[in-house]
Image: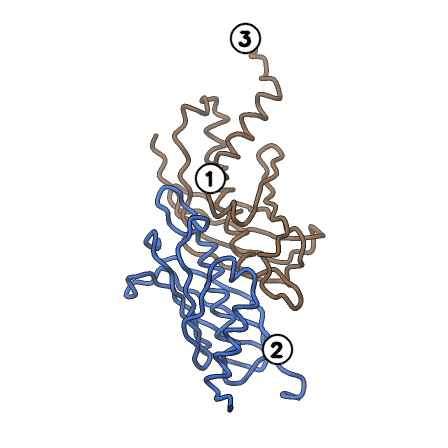
């Protein structure tokens, strides 16, 4: 017997709700003002420009620490989202899933390619390896042009244990 | 009034921090400056929390502290650079910081060349025998035009 696909709004609402709940639990993400655009399972992190993100007022340029934090947030949410996605799409009702605990950063290396301009920044993370305990993630950050990265980073993360 | 090298370092490093909006937004406070060395503290605040379960500060805020501290150490170097920017920064997170306690970072320039400053930094909380995080970084160095032809 063929099961009718769920109405698109129901699917969207479930996915967006799960993503929002994940992001909203972290106060520091709110402080930076980062939000996530979702296309299917693909996430793009957005860091809207704010004066408090400036590190060099003369140029002016974004603070290297704010940029690093933005990429680290992107990596952590991408990893947590990947865990959540698999469970959510397996058909389990979202309220039956245990809350996702966030991966912990082991190390994070940021490569500053050019200075961050005083405007919005975007980032996407790619999970290069995700095992039971450890994950390795690469993140790219850009501003006006997708092909002109202003920063990239690689980090290792300790994955949360996932018994329900 | 004469401006001793220590006074000059102090003044430059203090101005460096005060002029950085992001450092102010995170509540960073300069504690100490020496030759190519800086100590900066960051108080615990609810909006800096990264893990709501434990109340531990987000790694990103620690990165910002390390980055700022590294830059301040470069600015405090006796060779007298007039500007710096981070080229590369690696942070190792050794253990979660104790919730509710402030974090203090100490950065040191261990090698200065004409174009690059190599920096090491360590961050601790109230237990200064076990680092919360360590960092190594490479920073660009800008000189006044007439100072280095």
**Residue at position x 62%, y 81% from top?**
B143
Residue furthest to the front in view is B1
Q: Is residue A6 above or below residue B106?
A: above
Residue at point 40% right, 39% down? Answer: A101
Q: Is disc 3 placed on a helix, strand or loop?
A: loop
Chain letter of disc 3 in the image: A
Q: Position of residue A156 (x, y in %)?
A: 44, 52
Q: Within the image, what quadrant is residue B54 found in?
A: top left
Q: Label 3 to label 2, Cα distance in Å?
A: 71 Å
Q: Residue furthest top?
A: A1
Q: Which mark is residue B142?
A: 2
Circle 2 or circle 1, nearest the eye: 2
Q: Residues within 10 Å of mark 1 (few under 14, many from 20)?
A: some
Residue A1 tag number:
3
Percent of width and height locating residue B115: 59, 78
Q: In 3D space, how far apart are the residues under numbered discs 2 and 1 (Cα atoms)?
A: 40 Å
The residue singled out by tag 1 in the image is A80
- Residue at 44% x, 61% y is B91
């Amino acid at each position: 017997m063929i099961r009718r696909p769920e109405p698109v709004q129901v699917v969207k609402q479930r996915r967006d709700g799960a993503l929002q709940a994940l992001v909203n639990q972290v106060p520091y993400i709110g402080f930076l003002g980062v939000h996530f655009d979702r296309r299917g399972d693909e996430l793009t992190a957005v860091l809207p420009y704010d004066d408090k993100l400036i590190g060099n007022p003369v140029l002016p340029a974004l603070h290297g620490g704010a940029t690093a934090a933005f990429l680290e947030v992107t990596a952590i949410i991408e990893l947590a989202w990947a865990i959540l996605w698999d469970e959510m799409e397996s058909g389990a009702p979202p309220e039956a899933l245990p809350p996702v605990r966030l991966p912990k950063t082991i190390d994070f290396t940021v490569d500053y390619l050019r200075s961050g301009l005083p405007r919005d920044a975007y980032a996407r993370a790619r999970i290069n390896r995700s095992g039971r305990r450890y994950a390795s993630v690469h993140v790219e950050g850009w501003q006006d042009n997708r092909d002109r990265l202003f920063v990239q980073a690689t980090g290792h993360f300790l994955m949360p244990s996932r018994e329900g | 009034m004469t401006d001793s090298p220590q006074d000059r370092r102090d003044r430059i490093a203090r101005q460096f921090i005060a002029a950085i909006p992001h450092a102010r937004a995170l509540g960073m406070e300069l504690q100490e400056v020496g030759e190519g060395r800086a100590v900066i503290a960051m108080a615990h605040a609810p909006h800096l929390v990264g893990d709501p379960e434990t109340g531990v500060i987000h790694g990103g805020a620690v990165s910002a502290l390390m980055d700022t501290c590294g830059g301040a150490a470069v600015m405090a170097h006796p060779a007298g650079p007039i500007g710096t920017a981070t080229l590369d920064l690696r942070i190792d997170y050794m253990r979660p910081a104790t919730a509710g306690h402030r974090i203090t970072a100490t950065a040191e320039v261990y090698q200065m060349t004409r174009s690059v400053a190599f920096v090491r930094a360590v961050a601790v909380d109230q237990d200064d025998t076990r680092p919360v995080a360590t960092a190594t970084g490479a920073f660009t160095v800008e000189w006044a035009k007439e100072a280095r032809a």
